[in-house]
Image (cartoon, helix red, strand yellow):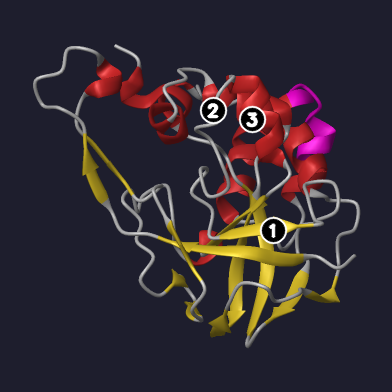
Amino acid sequence: MEAYVRQLFSGKIKQLGDPNATNPMDKPWESAIFKSETEEPIWASETGLIGDEVADKKTHGGPEKAIFSYPIKHYDYWKKDLETDAIDVGGMGENFAVFDMDESSVCIGDTYRFGDALLQVSQPRRPCWKPARRFRTMDLALRIQNSGRTGWYYRVLQEGYVRAGVHFELIERPYPKWTIQACNDVMYIYKDNLQLAEKLASCELLAPNWKHTLNKRILGQSSSSEKRVYGPNKA
């Protein structure tokens, strides 16, 4: 089989929640995680798919997180883990729902010809509190990162139209040892292994924000992940 995008998603920012709510999970929030499937070609620009919005531009979007990709097969796991059928393809806010590729088969720096565009893998996704809010599961961000089912981001090296049903053509794989899975292991499992952190941080094509986090760890300046994983969900 060949890896390809089975479904393509794009979405606008939505305002949600009740200003009178007492439960933090019900209070007002905004997100573009609710995306709609499209079969039409979409222009992939340096900062993302045209028409696909980002609510929190400080931590999402931009050239290093232009396009988010997530394996379709993971949804079987999440349906069982969360004991609900409410979570389905597109639920993690991905742009590309991909088939026959996952965190063990995708590497930092992988460069793909996809449609008219040239895409390069930049980093694993570091899950935040918004999927947790969407699916009413306080620790979902932790479950995502601990399971290794994070998905990954692409930077756009050459802009062009992309569409669902198109296969990826692997052009270059400069860092075969740095799979998305290996990166996640360094970030979340082998936290005390500073030698591994140094090796990953020295990977030229790893996104700068990941390098920054790893370099802080090496210097003994690691910060808490509470704000990222729980955000305003926790009172």
- Name the front one of labels 2 and 3: 3
Q: Earlier in the sequence, mark 2 or mark 3?
A: 3
Task: Categorize mark 2 by other alpha carbons within 10 Å: few (<14), some (14-19), many (20+).
Answer: many
User: How far apart are labels 3 and 1 at the CA level?
Assistant: 16 Å
Q: Earlier in the sequence, mark 1 or mark 2?
A: 1
| Residue 129 left/right relative to 104 | left
Seen in the picture, residue 188 relative to 6 is either above or below; the reply is above
State the extent of the magenta-drawn residues as a range.
Answer: 189-198
Label 2 is placed on what type of residue?
Answer: Ala
- Name the front one of labels 1 and 2: 1
Which type of secondary structure does the marked residue at label 1 adopt? strand
| Residue 80 left/right relative to 2 | left
Observer-nearest residue: 179 or 44?
A: 44
Task: Categorize mark 1 by other alpha carbons within 10 Å: few (<14), some (14-19), many (20+).
Answer: many
Observer-nearest residue: 154 or 215?
A: 154
Residue designated by label 3: 78
